[in-house]
Image (cartoon, rainbow, N blue to C red):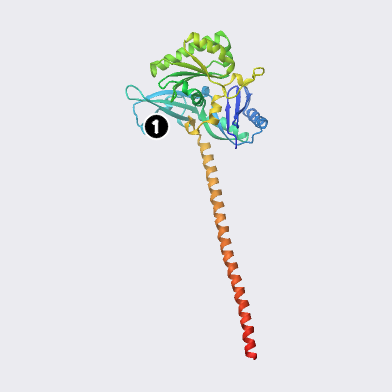
């Protein structure tokens, strides 16, 4: 069975996860200050170390490289909502329409009948750069997904039973470069905000105080704009090195119960390595989850390449079937010809025998 592969090219770390039977394998390599060529070399070396041949991969986009907006649109018709987003998306980011990729999720209806939408926007050049790095290493990008959505799905898959039907919960996905603040339920991701606090900064009091302040601000923003509900509990995921002190600080500062989301890759206590300061949950979800449920982005170049591959595969299949039919027909006709030739030979032999018998009668 071929292993599934997910890759994230971050500002500081390159993350690679390979799904295997039993447990996934993961490599995290430093890439801060690296050129694209150096990152490609690191990718190639990592795949040799993992003993995995190049193949299509899932590309994970870090939350701090993507713009996420919550919208309220005066329609409940999916087609009209899509048109509204298409017309107004350029007002939300300082880029031209042809320079961006976007996707969105419908989150229900607010009190006045407007549709609630979570919209994700990323610059096309960023995706092209990441895809180019992978392709230079002999990899082809199969799909592109937002880390926040996949991290939420990972939490729900493992702790969904601990979340009440109508509960609103906080998920803090701790990474080496940022902290992803998520507000969600079992059924939907409502809000995401990238907070510029690194996992290593959460091992001291100053960093913890900053994060608690940012959490309170994020809750106020969400409650003012979306729904006036207090979260039932907090889930913390990602960097294990920051969890002990953060769990204590949340219980004391926010007076909320805390649940840790186990990492898909266990670090050894005596040698935790860089994975202990990184979040790997989104990569694990991209390997284990359903691609149709992801919040992804479609790069036309990738889509065209996949279409060409599918058409090439179809042509090869059609050609193979055609060749099989031709060979079968040739075999059928050759068999008929062989039977006819055999029958003709038998007739000739019988004719010769009759002639010989007839000649003997004439002679007598």
Q: Quadrant of residue 269?
A: top right
Residue extending farthest left: 112
Depth check: 318 or 349 in front? Answer: 349
Residue at 58% x, 21% y: name it. 278
| Residue 230 x %, y % | 41, 15
Above/below status of 122 relative to 217: below
For the N terminus, give its image quadrant.
Answer: top right
Depth check: 38 or 213 in front? Answer: 213
In the rendered structure, the answer to whether residue 350 lies left or right of residue 159 reads right
| Residue 14 x %, y % | 61, 25
Q: State the count of labels.
A: 1
In the rendered structure, the answer to whether residue 18 lies left or right of residue 90 reads right
Above/below status of 275 relative to 307: above
SS of the residue under disc 1: helix
Q: Quadrant of residue 334?
A: bottom right
User: Badge 1: few (under 14), some or many (20 or more) residues near its Cα, within 10 Å?
Assistant: few
| Residue 242 x %, y % | 57, 15
| Residue 186 x %, y % | 44, 24
Above/below status of 348 relative to 360: above
Q: Which residue is mark 1?
A: 82
Residue extending farthest bottom: 364
């Amino acid at each position: 069975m071929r292993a599934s592969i997910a890759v994230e090219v971050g500002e500081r770390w390159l993350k690679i996860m390979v799904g295997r039977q039993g447990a996934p394998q993961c490599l995290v390599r430093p890439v801060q200050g690296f050129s694209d060529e150096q990152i490609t070399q690191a990718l190639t070396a990592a795949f040799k170390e993992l003993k995995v041949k190049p193949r299509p991969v899932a590309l994970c986009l870090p939350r701090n490289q993507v713009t996420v907006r919550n919208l309220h649109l005066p329609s409940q018709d999916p087609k009209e909502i899509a048109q509204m987003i298409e017309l107004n998306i350029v007002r939300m980011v300082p880029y031209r329409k042809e320079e961006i990729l976007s996707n969105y999720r419908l989150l229900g209806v607010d009190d006045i009948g407007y549709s609630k939408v979570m919209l994700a926007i990323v610059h096309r050049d960023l995706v092209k750069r990441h895809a180019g790095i992978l392709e230079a290493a002999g990899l082809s990008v199969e799909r592109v997904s937002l880390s926040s959505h996949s991290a939420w799905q990972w939490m729900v898959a493992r702790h969904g039973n601990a979340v009440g039907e109508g509960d609103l919960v906080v998920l803090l996905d701790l990474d080496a470069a940022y902290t992803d603040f998520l507000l969600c339920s079992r059924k939907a991701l409502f809000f995401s905000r990238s907070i510029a606090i690194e996992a290593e900064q959460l091992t001291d009091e100053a960093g913890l105080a900053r994060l608690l302040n940012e959490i309170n601000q994020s809750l106020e923003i969400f409650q003012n704009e979306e729904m006036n509900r207090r979260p039932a509990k907090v889930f913390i995921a990602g960097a294990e090195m920051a969890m002990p002190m953060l769990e204590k600080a949340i219980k004391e500062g926010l007076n909320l119960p805390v649940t840790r989301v186990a990492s898909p890759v266990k670090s050894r206590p005596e040698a935790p390595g860089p994975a202990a300061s990184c979040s790997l949950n989104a990569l694990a979800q991209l390997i284990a989850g359903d691609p149709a449920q992801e919040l992804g982005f479609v790069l036309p170049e990738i889509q065209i390449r996949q279409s060409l591959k599918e058409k090439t595969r179809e042509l090869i299949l059609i050609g193979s079937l055609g060749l099989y039919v031709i060979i079968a027909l040739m075999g059928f006709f050759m068999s008929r010809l062989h039977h006819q030739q055999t029958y003709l030979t038998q007739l000739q032999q019988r004719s010769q025998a009759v002639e010989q018998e007839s000649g003997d009668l004439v002679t007598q």
